[in-house]
Amino acid sequence: SELHEHAENTFSRRVALVTAVFAVVLAIAALGGNHAMKEMLLSQQQSSDQWAFYQAKVIREHLYRGQKLRLEADLAERDASLKPAAREKLEGLLRRLDEEEKRYGAEKKDIEKAAKDLEHTRDGYALRDPYFLIAEALLQIAIVMASVSILARSGLIFSFSLGLALIGAVLTANGYFMLFQLPFLHH
């Protein structure tokens, strides 16, 4: 009977120790999930800001283009009646409008690239997040099942909790390193 009780205590201690390891892996999974979600939301916000900035540049570019076209039409219409000094001044204005239109067009391209890069970052974190979520759930269930195995003195239930924790640990690692993709997690 004393031998049986010693075996039960050893089993309980081992399960408790392994359960503590499950809890550590759970904390690491939660940390990864929180980080992925935070970075995903931040990248989305920054991308939205870039697209708003892009739209402002597009509007300014179109304004300058409209002013330039109006001035070109005005110059063509008043061609013969313009004094050389007035023509020179209007042509200088036309060049400035053209330069501004081109500048906004170029700046717009850089902003578009930045917005797309941020969207790519967002999508990368969105890809990782489900692995952390599922890992957290499996590790929480593994902890509960390990506790039940102590109460039930069941090696089978403990083995089940080990299996769940192992899958949870693999999914946690995958959340960090994206070693594989499960097709049912991505639409």
Image: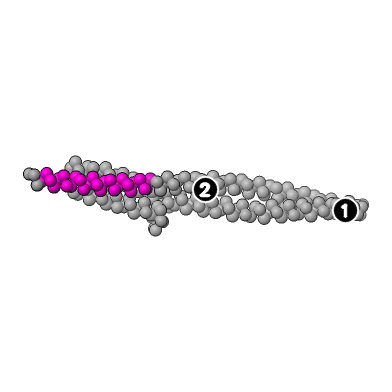
Q: Amino acid at mark 2?
A: Ser
Which stretch appears magenta? 4-30
Q: Name which residue lies at 56% across and 48% down.
A: 47
Label 2 and label 1: CA atoms lie apart by 50 Å
* Residue holding disc 1: 87
Nearer to us in this view, 7 or 99: 7
Residue type at mark 1: give it. Arg
Name the residue located 89 percent from the left edge and 51 percent from the top edge: 86
User: Of marks 2 and 1, which one's residue comes earlier in the chain?
Assistant: 2
- Counting from the top left corner in percent of width and height, residue 130 is at 40, 49
Res 43 label:
2
Measuring from the top left, give residue 57's x and y in whole percent: 67, 49
- The location of residue 99, given as percent across then percent down, is 74, 54
Residue 157 seen anywhere in this rendered image of the structure? no
Whether residue 10 is in magenta: the answer is: yes
Q: Secondary structure at mark 2?
A: helix
Residue found at the very far bottom of the displayed protein: 179
The residue depicted at 66 percent of the width and 53 percent of the height is 107
Q: Is residue 131 left or right of residue 40?
A: left
Q: Is residue 73 left or right of residue 10?
A: right
Q: Is residue 109 left or right of residue 45?
A: right
Q: Which mark is residue 95?
A: none
> Percent x, y for residue 35?
44, 47
In the rendered image, residue 7 lying in the magenta stretch gets the answer yes
Q: Is residue 67 left or right of residue 177?
A: right
